[in-house]
Amino acid sequence: MKTLKIFLLMSATLLFYACNNNLEDVMSAEDVAALQAMETAYYAAATYNDSLATYIETTGITHDESSFYYDGMYHRYDSMFAANHEMYSHMNSGDDHDGDSWMMGSGWMNGSNGHMNSGGHTGNGFNASFCTSENLELMDSLMRAHENYHPGN
């Protein structure tokens, strides 16, 4: 009986520490939603920028309904990225910057850590686990690439 009590006590202690450590790594539902929205917004903005670039390069037209549509959709999603970045808490163990350290168009990225593909956005993937400086570098790179195709340039 004494062995059983010791075993149960050790099991309960181990379970307590295991649960306690896992809880520190759990991201809030709000942060998960914001991070997923940032990922969706980044990829959608990249897609619309690619479409705009292809349209302009193929037709040579920069001031018509199609170019304004692609541009407008790009800006909708890059704004969505920024808004969700503002809502993200930056309190998770894998985050590598504060919430105040990036604002849309901040020039976060001084160099290029990713290679530019034909559409203008970097080839690195979005980190969907945490809010990292790599994600901000991807978005800044996309913003710089969009400047080359923004209608009116």
Image (tube, rainbow, N blue to C red):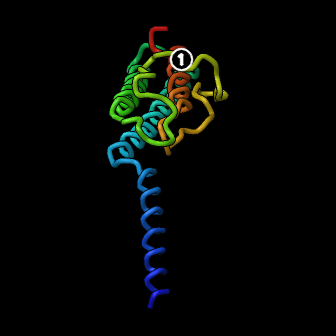
Local secondary structure at mark 1? helix
Q: Amino acid at mark 1?
A: Arg
Residue at the location (42% across, 65% down)? 16
55 w.r.t. 19: above or below: above
Q: Position of residue 119 (x, y in %)?
A: 59, 27
Horizontal side of 28 relative to 50 (left or right) equals left
Residue at the location (55% across, 29% down)? 138
Number of numbered labels in the structure image = 1
Name the quarter where the N terminus is drawn.
Answer: bottom left
Q: Position of residue 79 (x, y in %)?
A: 37, 26
Q: Quadrant of residue 53?
A: top right
Q: Position of residue 7 (x, y in %)?
A: 48, 80
Q: Residues within 10 Å of mark 1 (few under 14, many from 20)?
A: some
Q: Quadrant of residue 35?
A: top left
Residue at the location (43% across, 51% down)? 24
Q: Nearer the viewer, residue 134 or 97?
A: 97
